[in-house]
Image (tube, rainbow, N blue to C red):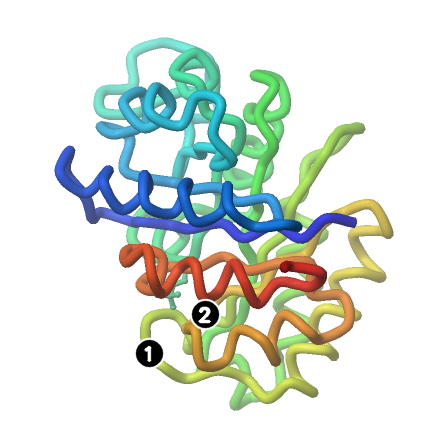
Amino acid sequence: MKPLIAGNWKMNGVSASLGEADKIAGLVAAMKSAPEVVVCPPATLIAQLVRRMQERPVGVGGQDCHPKSSGAHTGDISAEMLADAGALYVIVGHSERRQDHGETDDVVKDKAEAARRAGLIPIVCVGETEAERRAGRHEAVVRRQVAGSLPNGEGPLVVAYEPVWAIGTGLTPTLEDIADMHRLVRELAGPAVRILYGGSVKPQNAHEILGVENVDGALVGGASLKADDFFAIISSAKGAR
Ligand code: PGA
């Protein structure tokens, strides 16, 4: 399957930052063989980015959506609204949302199903905390999250394995640990699901991480904010030329 490199800008970026996406699109367009590339900017930039990426090889995604399609939910954005703005993907269940907003597996599953309902491809995030890994509970935790957060029904799906202790810390699991966790997710999620690794992916470690079996791409936070770094990661995908 074609690798997917997704950038998660988190709560970073204003209109002036869209130049970075322009630069990425130009670099990806010049590749002989490119992975699929998606940028998930803050919601305020989605419509602008979609306009700028028309006919260009960079897709646009949201970072979260509400389970309902509309209603009295001040500050929330529905999957239908993201689709209407031109998004193709939406991240759901990122650990920062699970932690900061108390999102449970049930809520994440509802959001993933909302994404499908709206015609978006959900990127469902799972991953253990540092304490859970130290206690040897990482497999059990990810098993529970995959069982509880993945949407029912048919359709394209992306799962991102992101150990919480690796996000924004510069720490990464060993390649063997990544291989073990991705094998587990593959067993649980099935052969058709793209499984991304996320957590401190950088130009320096991208090639070896993206070369691991069952790693079908990366979800990149910090290093997706600078076009040169993000492009170095894109160029490290399997089959990229
Ligand atoms: P990071 O974030 O690449 O900055 O570690 C990854 C993520 O949270 O998706």
**What residue sits 43% from the left and 21% below the top?**
54
Tell me, for residue 169, which label it has, or none: 1
Relative to 187, 13 lies left or right: left
Q: Which is nearer the eye, 32 or 229? A: 32
Label 2 sits on residue: 199
10 Å neighbourhood of mark 1: few (<14), some, or many (≥20)? few
Q: Position of residue 39 (x, y in %)?
A: 41, 42
**What residue sits 44% from the left and 32% below the top?**
60
Q: Position of residue 5 (x, y in %)?
A: 54, 53
Which of marks 2 and 1 precedes in the sequence?
1
Q: Position of residue 185 (x, y in %)?
A: 74, 62
Label 1 close to label 2 by CB (< 8 Å): yes
What amino acid is at disc 1? Thr
Q: Which SS class for mark 2?
A: loop
Q: Is residue 100 above or below residue 71?
A: below
Q: Position of residue 180 (x, y in %)?
A: 74, 79
Query: Looking at the rendering, which quadrant does residue 151 occupy?
Result: top right
